[in-house]
Amino acid sequence: MSICLICTLGNRDIQFKKEHEQELKNILGDIFDNGKDLDSNELYLKKNNFLDHTCKILKNYDSIKNYITLPIIQPCLDYIENQLNGTVEKIILIPTNQQNENDLEDRYKKGDTFIEAEIIKRFLEENGFKDKVVIREAKFNASKLDIWFNHILNIIHNNYEIFDKIIFEISGGVPTSKESIRLATLFKEKIEVVEVSGGNINLENMSSFEKQIIKEKVKDIIKNYNYAGALSFKEYYTDDKKILNLIEHLNYRLNFDFYNALKSHEEERLKKLMRENNTIKKLKYLILELLDNMEIELRNRNYANFLARVYRLEEAMGQYFVLKWFEKTKTKISYKLGNNLPSGLIDTKDMGVDDLNNKLGSYLKYLVGGIQRGNSYNPPGIRKLANFIEEKCKKTNNGKTYYRTTINTPLYYELISYLYGNYSDEIRVYEKIQKKYKKNHNNLRHTTIVAHGFEGINKEKINKMLEQNGVNEDINNYFKSIKSEFFKIANSKEKENIFDKLNKEIINHL
């Protein structure tokens, strides 16, 4: 297993063998701390003027190199070799270098570790790691968490795909470097964050608190169907492809971008929709998507967006019910669009979902032409359509007879009522959709930003609108009943909203 070891540096990363204390003092002077190091019995450097002390060490390196110890880095190397059975292919040292920060006090600059990094690099290369040690200086104010975070992310991105595992050792360094590493490594399973205490590797301090905070935040965002917001945290869980793919899938799906949604995650119902060639079945799946989508808009109080989808739902259900009746009565249709050749008689399942209003309108005009020529229609399905045209579409003006067969939602209502009957399940659910807003009177949708106005919209206005249409029910419950009734008509066994279903999968995985 190839491993990259990344170390932030502090004043205890380089130490010296205590038995050579006097000789070292003769060479380096009074640079050692009088206290006892927590991790070893060796000599370590005073914090004051740390940069000057390391300059002395580097200058006299050849004279004192045999007395150097690495009480923090060495346990990491032993851990990798003995417990992980890995091979260190690269060591990255991250020292501070704040010398060009003009607004920073000198006392902070004197604590810089970039010379210490040069000493450690030289020592490691002479002891088995030749050409494997690199230095990535933090050339900025070391108190800046955001700059640290980007610096660490850049190091991770440049090495993540190269190695089987990355070990971050954070015993040294400033608090901001440690926090940035903990944040940048969240949800990345190939990375371990460790500290050394008493010469032992401590795996318990792996930012579990920070990880839990981010997880809970993402859970809340997912519960509110804010997938774009959840994707803003994706740098924390890019290693977990399942979570990332599901969130991307739902974000695309919420915007009806089914092609990219399937590329992210192959959910069964959406696969059926995209692969379905039967026009009626495909239309059913599209309506199921629209119903689930509208339910989310309603829950999120996006009332203008909800109303914007009402007309499309009304139109799509009208198309579905009419085509289902054609299928039931084995009625074939013919249509002509623009300059295209006539389609000839085809099954409704082969019509395709595009431009359905014009296709159906063209067929009704075709029947009108036959009626005007005195044609008789014997097949029961076509005969009933012809009767509908004679009874509902025939108009007289100044003694002249004409037929109004333009396809729109009022015509769908009349057609569904005529074909299925006034007490059918189909007309009942269709009436419920139409009562969401008053036709030709105070159409609330038209006054909002999604149509022709600038009025604000809220739940109270929608409920009042329903009341004006004879519906004394809250919009949430009213919409649930519409969805439930359509599921029953379409014989759909899937009752749970698809977004809720996949949300649970994401949350459980988190």
Image: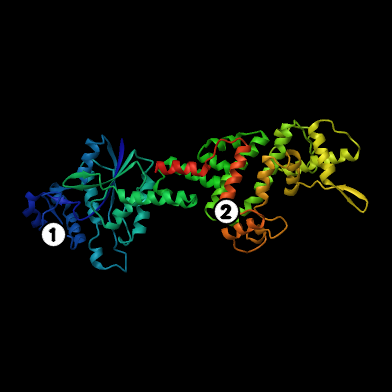
Locate the N terminus and report the quarter of the image it occupies: top left
Q: Nearer the viewer, residue 198 or 132?
A: 198
Q: Is residue 17 left or right of residue 201?
A: left
Residue 108 in percent (x, y) is at: 25, 64
Residue 237 in percent (x, y) is at: 40, 46
Residue 228 in percent (x, y) is at: 49, 51
Q: Is residue 492 left or right of residue 35?
A: right
Tell me which amino acid carries mark 2: Asp
Residue 93 in percent (x, y) is at: 28, 50
Say the numbered circle drawn on residue 474: 2
Task: Give me the residue at 32% from left, 65% from top.
Answer: 101
Classed neighbour count for the residue bearing mark 2: other residues with Cα under 10 Å, few (<14), some (14–19), many (≥20): some
Tell me which amino acid carries mark 1: Ile
SS under mark 2: loop
Q: Nearer the viewer, residue 464 or 415?
A: 464
Label 2–label 1 contact, CB within 8 A: no
* Alpha-carbon span between mark 2 and mark 1: 77 Å
Q: Is residue 352 left or right of residue 251?
A: right
Q: Which residue is mark 1?
A: 31
Q: Name, please, the residue furthest toward the right.
A: 399
